[in-house]
Structure formats: C-alpha cells, structure tokens
Amino acid sequence: MTGSKRPLVVLPDPILRQVSKPVERIDDETRRLASDMLATMYDAPGIGLAAIQIAEPLRLITIDLAKEDDEPDPHVFVNPKIVARGDEPGTYEEGCLSIPDYFAEVERPATVAVEYLDLEGDMQVIEADGLMATCLQHEVDHLDGVLFIDHISRLKRDMVVKKFRKLAKERGGTRLL
Ligand code: K1U
Ligand code: ZN
C-alpha cells in the first residue's frame, strides 16, 4: 500500500504536547495511517515518525534506519511500550521533524526493550541498542507529549521555542506541507 504524504506539525503547535490514545483496533484505517506516516517520513526525510506529528493522536510510530543506498526497512509499532531500560547511558545528536533544522545531544539509556503490536495484531518484543534504541525512545516520548528539547537545558529549550514561535508568526501557522 502506497501512502500519502501528510502535513507535518511543528513547534510550537500545542497538539505536540497531547498524550496519544492507544490504537483500539488494527484495521485497514490503521494500515492506511501507517502507510501515510511512512510516506511522510520518507519524504521529509526522517528516520522516525509518531502519528501525533501528522496530527493523529494515536499510539503508532514508524521507523526506518536503512541507509540511503540500501533497501528500505520500514518498521511499524502499534501501542509501543518500553518495558526495560538498560543501566548504561548513550548519547546521540538528535533531530526532530517537528523542530526542523535543530539538533542537540541527548543522553538516554543505551538499550531498551519495547513491546508492541505489529500490523497483524501480533504482540512483538524488540530489544534495541544504538540508534534504534534512541529512535524508539524519541518516538515513544512523542506519544506522551514529550519532545527531545525537554531533555536539554532550559536555557537552550527556551531559545528554540522562542525561535519557532517567531517562525510560526511569520509563516502564519505550525503545519508544514
Ligand atoms: O521523530 C522525529 O521527529 C523524527 C526524527 C527521529 C530521530 C532522529 C535522530 C535521533 C532520534 C530520533 C528524525 O528523523 S530527524 C531527521 C534525521 O535524523 C535524519 C534525516 C535523514 C537522514 C538521516 C537522519
Ligand atoms: Zn521528533
């Protein structure tokens, strides 16, 4: 199924602070939304996306860490839940499609285990490290209304928010087509 690219919600849109609701039933509508998310993510381009970033407050995320020249490797996680976090910290320079062109180092657990449903409704568990662990935590944060700038200093965060408030005023909105 080929999805349609949807507008991206960007800072300071308050929808990004909403807590997303669990997906109650996995059906064609869910699969259509997942396809639209993948299309939007590939177009951006990005390596992950949470449904709330296209204004759908549902607990659904997509991730593809394949390199540009490799075959796509799309992953869809329905109702993902972090069930274990490793003791070792890891640091990555993170970005966010909802905070375009801003990057900052964020420290998070280097490994996580995540339970989720696949698009057939089967329960799965992924034990992740490296960029996959970081990306899963970044996306699950989105489902709880948390942004990666919440993990940096207040001074830096306030500066970023101020800049994006100004941009939204100039653009006349917080949706990127
Ligand atoms: O959730 C998002 O906003 C997507 C975000 C995911 C992410 C990136 C880095 C660390 C943690 C989570 C992005 O995809 S930002 C764009 C990006 O990182 C990228 C884009 C093209 C090629 C490679 C990376
Ligand atoms: Zn993000």
Image (cartoon, grey):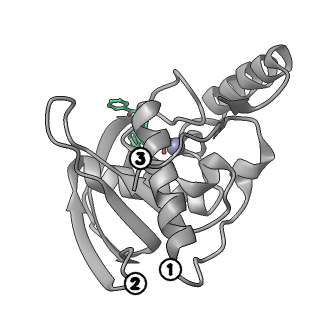
Circle nearer the N terminus (2, 3): 3
Q: Residue at x 63, y 47 (%)?
A: 54
Mark-to-mark CA distance, 3 and 1: 20 Å
- Indicate the position of residue 100 as horizontal and vertical percent values: 56, 26
Q: Position of residue 64 (x, y in %)?
A: 30, 48
Circle 2 residue: 121
Image location of residue 175, percent across then percent down: 72, 33
Q: Nearer the viewer, residue 161 or 158?
A: 161
- What percent of the width, then of the height, locates residue 123? 34, 85
Q: Are marks 2 and 1 in contact (CB under 8 Å)?
A: yes
Q: Secondary structure at mark 3?
A: strand
Residue toward you, 1 or 99: 1
Foreground residue among 30 and 133: 30
Q: Residues within 10 Å of mark 2 (few under 14, many from 20)?
A: few
Labels 3 and 1 touching (C-beta < 8 A): no
Q: Examine the rendered structure and indicate whether residue 19 appears above or below residue 8.
A: below
**In the rendered image of this protein, does residue 123 appear above or below residue 112?**
below
Q: Amino acid at mark 3?
A: Gly
Q: Secondary structure at mark 2?
A: loop
Residue 26 numbered mark, or none: 1
Does residue 126 lie above or below 15 as drawn? below
Mark 1: which amino acid?
A: Ile
- Residue 140 seen from this side: no
Write the residue at 54% across / 40% down.
Answer: 5
Marked residue nearer the N-terminal end (3 or 1): 1
The answer to whether residue 19 shows anywhere in this view is yes
Considering every residue shown, the one lying at the far top of the view is 170
Q: Quadrant of the N terminus?
A: bottom left
Label 1 crowd bin: few (<14), some (14–19), many (20+), radius 10 Å: some
- In this view, the residue in front, 114 or 111, is 114
In the picture, the disc for residue 48 is 3
Q: Nearer the viewer, mark 2 or mark 3?
A: 2
